[in-house]
Amino acid sequence: MYLGVDYYPEHWPKEMLEQDLNGIKDLGANIIRIGEFAWHLMESEEGEYDFTFFDEVIAKAKERGLSVMFGTPTATFPAWLAKKHPSILSEDENGQKRVFGGRRQYCFNSKIYREYSAKITRKLVEHYQNEEAIVAWQIDNEFGHEGSDMCYCNQCHQGFQEFLARKYDGSIAKLNETYGTIFWGQTYNDFSEIPMPTKTITTHNPSLELDWARFRSFSVNSYAHEQTEIVKELKGAHQQVTTNVSGGFFDKWFDHEENVKPMDFVSYDNYPVWGGLAEPITPAAIALNHDFNRGLLDKNFWIVEELMGAQGHNVIGYLPRPNQAAMWSYQAFAHGCTDLLYFRWRGMTKGAEQFCYGVVDHDNHYGRKYKEVQSVFETIRPYEEVLQSPIESDVALLYDYDNIWSWRFQTQTESYDFMNEALRLYTPFYNLNVNIDVVPTTRDFSKYKVLLVPTLQIIDEELGERLKEFVSSGGTVYFSYRTGIKDKNNNIHFQKTLPGFAAEISGITIHEIESLSSGESVRIKGEGKYEGRTGECTTWRDIITPQAAKTLYRYDDPFYPEAAVTKNVYGKGSVYYLGAGIGEEIIQDFAEETVEDHVIPYQVSEKGVEVYSRKLNGANYHFLMNHTETVKAFKDITLQPYESKIVKAED
Ligand code: GLA
Ligand code: ZN
């Protein structure tokens, strides 16, 4: 079990190295992550490779029993490279080249950049392949973050046209047919005529847009895989390979499961609050983030950047309350984190991250945060085996990047946000403290009992059949609005009544729809066991005509009094169709019904108290997190504000 900090010795006078390493050691740490932004230090002139600085750092770390995760430094190339080859710089949608000065401004399709990246990475890993202190390599840093997954340069344009030619087997006729380019007279005679979807009058062809997103994903992932293969070819057998996933992964233009496929484990950077946010994201959102990262390789993961101090570039915000960052660490451990490093040892006085506070701050004072980290490391280490235990879930939330990208190009309603829609279904089950996996639709989901399927527009026949099989065999599916309207070419199904391939199992048809703009809502009222219950729906509404399904809620609307929420029994299973932006309290009723029906173990806890249960050798370990500023209790256990603890349960 590795516990440590992200350390940048290159930021400080060399005479501070040993004092720092002693301070890190006294935290109870046994690992440091170094190097991910230090390309120039290792190659200050082209072809002049020098690793002596890090040789000394690693030697001093080893003297203190500290292991090392080393980052390949391709996220920040040297100025001499940008000057010699400006073509490596990416371009924004307006054709504006990004200038040297930030980070990750490289184009993933620059052949020159790939050559230089390969050289530095090859030299670095060859140099350290036998270094027993280095236990893991981090590839680049937060692929695609801060807008770096999008580039509109000529290399990308040409790459896109080649990508399309391969995808459509060289047949421009096939592309025209798929895209429907007859519309607005857009028929192409040749792949070389095809544009990137940059600024135009009105909007682009949806099939083109989705293929462009797929090309972006291909660009990022082929670069990542090229780098990964170099490291795997040269690294020592004792060294593993990972990359660190950044927050906002549903807002990125690349498929993360594909990105990490060749790696040994996933790492995640957990920042429950960043920049100018006045308060952290919700506890459920933090939890979903961890479940997403655990789902990528379907195994436990590392956190290589855990927030301890307030963070931000030009604007910072919320200061974690005492023990709140410790509690977030416990929450990460609960959801599958096995090894954790805090970002970062000491806040830097110079450069773009002066306001990214660390374990220790600019005054080099070992204060509250230092002690909080010490306490986490001391109290979590005895649970190493528990943290290694696999997490079994009966519930899974399904996502599909094609679907997410389809929504990003055509949001259909101004207030659409995929993460919000995922949380709309996830949170009621999170509130019941059940384990939830977050996995792509391509994953075999037959082992689960419940599937949460937020706004999955793109359902083709194959997926429709797998969902039908799942429900027939006894599973419960939750669909939300706009389910099944499109095919994998981002086109609306023709002559298929909505919700398309989900219609039969949902037991409904949909012939009317309405986008609800921000602030607009429609009342809904309960029927049957929900008689007398009312609520408001926002964002969107499908006007549902039940066929075999039962109406649970209908719109309180004289013009469209049809169903808003239905439940259909199909085969041995059932399908809830939530045809609008329904509130948490209404879905909470359904969630409780579902976990009871399926006899899924769950815990009742006060709002803000998270209970996550792990099993080891027949014993249950409840991770308790108080996400609130008030004293709470779970059973007979008192939890102080932001307190977290693990209790071994006799049940
Ligand atoms: C990200 C990056 C780090 C640093 C932190 C600041 O996670 O990986 O390099 O920029 O944010 O909070
Ligand atoms: Zn480019």
Image (spheres, rainbow, N blue to C red):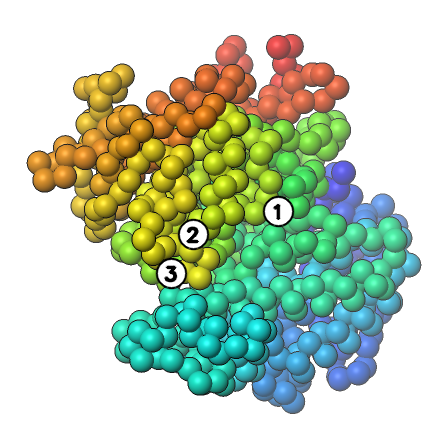
Is label 1 in a helix, a strand or a loop?
Answer: helix
Residue 275 falls left or right of residue 104: left
- In this rendered view, identify the residue nearer to me: 179 or 650: 179
- CA distance for labels 1 and 3: 28 Å
- CA distance for labels 2 and 3: 9 Å
Q: Compared with residue 408, is residue 587 higher up or lower down, i.e. above or below?
A: above
Q: Residue at x 76, y 64 (%)?
A: 229
Q: Residue at x 49, y 29 (%)?
A: 472
Residue 18 falls left or right of residue 554: right
Is label 2 in a helix, a strand or a loop?
Answer: loop
Res. 491 mark? 3
Which percent across, then down, holds residue 358?
59, 51
- In this rendered view, identify the residue nearer to me: 52 or 368: 52
- In this rendered view, identify the residue nearer to me: 228 or 400: 400
Say which of marks 1 and 3 sits in front.
3
Q: Quadrant of the C terminus?
A: top right
Q: Amino acid at mark 2?
A: Ile
Mark closer to the chain start, 1 or 3: 1
Tag count: 3
Q: Find disc 2 in the rendering and name its residue.
A: 458
Give the crowd class for mark 3: few <14, some 14-19, many >=20 residues within 10 Å: some
| In the image, farthest residue toward the right | 130
Q: Is residue 168 visible?
A: yes
Which percent across, then down, holds residue 639?
51, 21
Q: Amino acid at mark 3?
A: Asn
Is label 3 in a helix, a strand or a loop?
Answer: loop
Q: Find disc 1 in the rendering and name its residue.
A: 296
